[in-house]
Amino acid sequence: MHGEIVEKLSGNILDKLISIASTSSDHPALIDPYAANGSKYRSFDELYTDVAIVAYRMREKGIRVGDRVLIFIPYTYELFVVLLAVTYSGAVAVFADIAAHGDMINQVCLSAKPRAFIGILASFALMKNSQLRRVPIKLWHKSLLSGRKPTSPKMDTVPVDSESSALFTFTSGTTGNPKAADRSHAFLWRQHKVLAAHQHFDRDEVDLTLWPVFALSNLVQGVTSVIPHFNSRKPGSAKPEVIHRQIVDSKVTAMTGPPIFFEHLAEYWQTRTPPETLKRASVGGAPVFPALAQKLVQVLGDRSLEAIYGSTEAEPMTSLTLAKLAEDATFGGVPVGEPLPETTLRIMAEIETASNSLGRVAEEGDSGEIVVAGPHVLDRYFQSDEDYKLTKVHAEGRLWHRTGDIGYLKGGKVTLLGRLAFGIKAGEKTVYSFPFEKRMKQEPDVIRSALVGSKGNAAGFVQLRKKTRNLRVAEIEAIARDTLEKLDLPAARIIANTVEIPTDKRHNSRIEYATLLRQV
């Protein structure tokens, strides 16, 4: 099925980047805000040379084909050099979130058993009482890029089977232990092709993206990426004035990032003129509510603006223009648009995993779990049979991914209601969080909100801006109460204050419902 939709890859995906480097040697590959020598523009030839040098030195240090290399480097130029050098060498790059805590690092080491660790100097503090001490090869990333350069470092990439692993990314799993998305060279290529077909970038595009995997796709198609100047441990802390200056200085034409990132920019641009070079923006990684769409349409006008819906295992799945989303004034779920041409999406009333059948498809307009199939759907995890069984279904000669999201289809368009695991029983029906969040987000004093419940207890959490007046607090509590009554949860508690609602570390936008549920 993959071959019918997307051109197949033969061998190492880095061969594609080298091909781009040979035809676009002087074209900027990455614009680096942290460059020590003041040279922000990193050409494809410079990137290829640095990758080859690091790969050469890695081989000198004993890193071989198939070795797993744990990388702990923030979103910088050096991250791309090391990552690409690992792939260039036929080794496997292993990633834990840069904001990961010590316990997760230990679990990653126990699971992946990396043979090498490459990290920033501060990351070596994690060695104390850590499984990292058992990793045979430990390298400071700067040491691989400094010093005397070898003569003629450029070599052919190490030939590998295209289905061999290229990249492990560890995220929190359904079992509580980290699960590793195992991306092969072939999968990375398929994911790139689907993303590139959707973006329609040309070679003159300059894309500022908060997601390194999108920047990797840009590199493979010869498009310039701007590395954002921010703390990659906490994207929500990005200063809008700094990002604005980057857009102006680098003549950025496109942007991709999570809602919290665009929230800050939208507020900043309400009193300033947005950069004229910026022609398009894609918001995703978490639900995009109409309130944010309205703000961005107001400040950016008729530029090409969209909300994208996807997951680690299938990115992207659907898209919707922000102009359409901004018009949505209904009470209910969050519209996310139509599936991409490469994505087959269904809403399942019941899922049958014991036979060669998905199960019972929901009627139009009825809710159920969203499942997807397509060339960009992740087809394996590393040593996580349980997660595979919980999230994958083989049916109709295809592999389907269970997203864990609840939604419905109407007129070919998808609407999200919330997460399957955090539904709340209300009589004969199940209530989900997104309708509550969507309504509360319309209030300017609300930063975010969430609805959780279990065993007859439910609570609506509302995070307020710090200077919210007492009168407004009472008004917001009344709106929350009315919303809960409409959802058939009149007895639910309302907790409205300035206490931060916990979100994921990667996007600072996805609410950690499990953490809130423990408080109910």
Image (cartoon, rainbow, N blue to C red):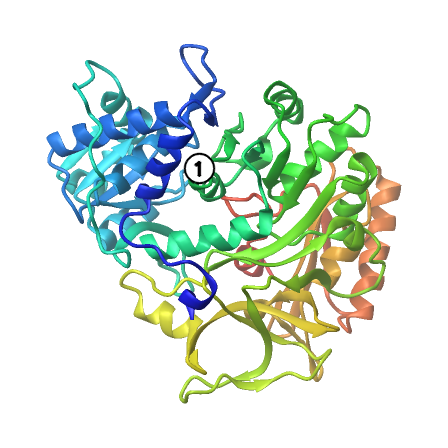
Residue at left 63%, top 37%? 261
Residue 39, horizontal then vertical, whole percent: 45, 13
Quarter of the figure with residue 76? top left
Q: Residues within 10 Å of mark 1 (few under 14, many from 20)?
A: many
Residue at left 27%, top 35%? 85
Seen in the picture, residue 84 relative to 177 is either above or below; the reply is: above
User: In the visual, does 379 lie left or right of 150?
Assistant: right
Residue at left 39%, top 61%? 176
**Which amino acid lies under the numbered mark 1 shown in the image of this protein?**
Leu
Residue 84, horizontal then vertical, whole percent: 32, 37
The quadrant in which the C terminus is found is bottom right
The residue tagged with tag 1: helix, strand or loop? Answer: helix
Question: From this viewpoint, is residue 183 visible?
Answer: no
User: In the visual, does 317 lie left or right of 473?
Assistant: left
User: In the visual, does 348 lie left or right of 10?
Assistant: right
Question: From this viewpoint, is residue 13 visible?
Answer: yes
Seen in the picture, residue 474 relative to 262 is either above or below; the reply is: below
- How many dots with numbers? 1
Seen in the picture, residue 379 relative to 444 is either above or below; the reply is: below
Q: Which residue reaches farthest top? A: 37
Residue 321, horizontal then vertical, whole percent: 73, 52
Quarter of the figure with residue 60? top left
Residue 275, horizontal then vertical, whole percent: 72, 25
The quadrant in which the N terminus is found is bottom left
Where does label 1 land, which residue? Answer: 219
